[in-house]
């Protein structure tokens, strides 16, 4: 059911919206009550909110950081349209709108839900990272500098969304160090580090695979169908079973975890008895197209 949600347009958008709700829940119930500053542009919006409230000597009934964040994302949508396409922008606006709306509804507890701050921080990173990762896997984002990270990662293969976010937040937390307490900065950094790791694991297009396909079918359509379906080339060679001595064909293809289901379905349509092995997290260099949306 989950894989179907990722590969069907309507279900995909619905799953992305659910990811936005998950992110809003984790943020409002676990991170905001700790007075932590999350990663990226939202973190800057939270800092701006705190400075405005301190300057005015009042606390707003709603978290205006989300309003500031939405406004700051408007020029970023143009970058997303130019580099990542119309569909990505539409999904991002949808997911961001859902997040902004839900975050206004979910009440923010006066005190953290858990007594232990580090447990609350890590749990919040897990929930928020999973929600954000779902939106990325579903063809959009929740806005912010992660869109810039996506655009750059299409050009520079060793840069992932999580790694870019980690580097981009150095300036944010240096600012927090001078404006707020050291404890706030430390817990915010712990949250961000865990959050980026979770995002990279849930963002399936960001997980590289090396797939070996062993088949006795002599149908030349196997590599042709894989190229047509996935838009990826593969390397082919002939082999034989060590025990039976029967001839077989071996295909090697590099792809993403997001495309694995489509690959298996394509192969089994030609040869239901094909043997497939998958190696996850391989390092790929050279002419490899990263499909991130």
Image (tube, rainbow, N blue to C red):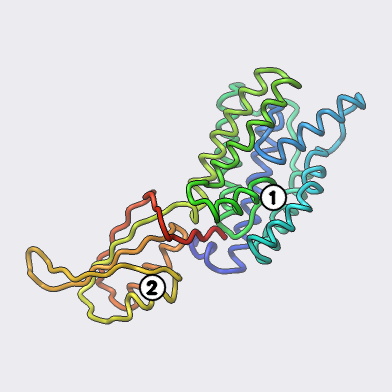
Question: Looking at this view, is 38 or 104 the one in front?
Answer: 38
Compared to 141, does 174 lie above or below? above
Residue bearing the label numbered 1: 143
In which image quadrant can residue 15 be found? bottom right
Residue bearing the label numbered 2: 226
Compared to 289, does 43 lie above or below? above
In the rendered view of the protein, which quadrant contains the C terminus? bottom right
User: Tag 1, which secondary structure?
Assistant: loop
Does the CB distance between marks 2 and 1 fall below 8 Å? no
**Residue located 56% across and 46% down the image:** 161
Question: Looking at this view, is 174 or 244 the one in front?
Answer: 174
The earlier-in-sequence mark between 2 and 1 is 1
**Residue located 60% across and 35% down the image:** 124
User: Tag 2, which secondary structure?
Assistant: helix
Q: CA distance from mark 2 to mark 1?
A: 33 Å
Compared to 183, does 125 lie above or below? below
Question: Looking at this view, is 62 or 213 the one in front?
Answer: 213
**Residue located 64% across and 60% down the image:** 83
- 10 Å neighbourhood of mark 2: few (<14), some, or many (≥20)? many
Q: Residue furthest right?
A: 56
x, y percent for residue 114: 61, 26
x, y percent for residue 14: 63, 61
């Amino acid at each position: 059911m989950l894989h179907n949600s990722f590969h069907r347009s309507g279900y995909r958008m619905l799953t992305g919206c659910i990811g936005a709700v998950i992110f809003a829940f984790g943020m409002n119930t676990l991170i905001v009550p700790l007075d932590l500053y999350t990663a990226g542009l939202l973190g800057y919006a939270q800092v701006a909110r705190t400075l405005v409230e301190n300057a005015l000597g009042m606390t707003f009934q709603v978290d205006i950081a989300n309003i500031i964040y939405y406004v700051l994302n408007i020029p970023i949508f143009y970058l997303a349209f130019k580099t990542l396409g119309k569909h990505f922008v539409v999904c991002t606006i949808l997911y961001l709108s859902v997040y902004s709306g839900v975050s206004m509804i979910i009440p923010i507890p006066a005190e953290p839900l858990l007594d232990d701050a580090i447990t609350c921080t890590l749990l919040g990173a897990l929930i928020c990272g999973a929600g954000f990762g779902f939106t990325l896997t579903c063809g959009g984002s929740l806005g912010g500098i992660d869109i810039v990270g996506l655009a750059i990662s299409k050009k520079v293969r060793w840069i992932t969304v999580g790694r870019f976010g980690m580097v981009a937040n150095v300036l944010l937390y240096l600012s927090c160090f001078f404006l707020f307490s050291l404890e706030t900065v430390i817990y915010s950094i712990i949250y961000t580090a865990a959050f980026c790791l979770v995002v990279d694991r849930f963002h399936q297009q960001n997980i590289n695979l090396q797939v070996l396909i062993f088949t006795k079918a002599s149908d030349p359509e196997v590599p042709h169908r894989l190229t047509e379906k996935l838009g990826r080339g593969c390397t082919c060679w002939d082999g034989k079973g060590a025990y039976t001595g029967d001839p077989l064909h071996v295909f090697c293809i590099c792809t993403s975890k997001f495309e694995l289901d489509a690959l298996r379905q394509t192969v089994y349509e030609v040869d239901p008895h094909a043997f497939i092995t998958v190696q996850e997290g391989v390092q790929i260099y050279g002419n490899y197209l990263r499909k991130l949306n």
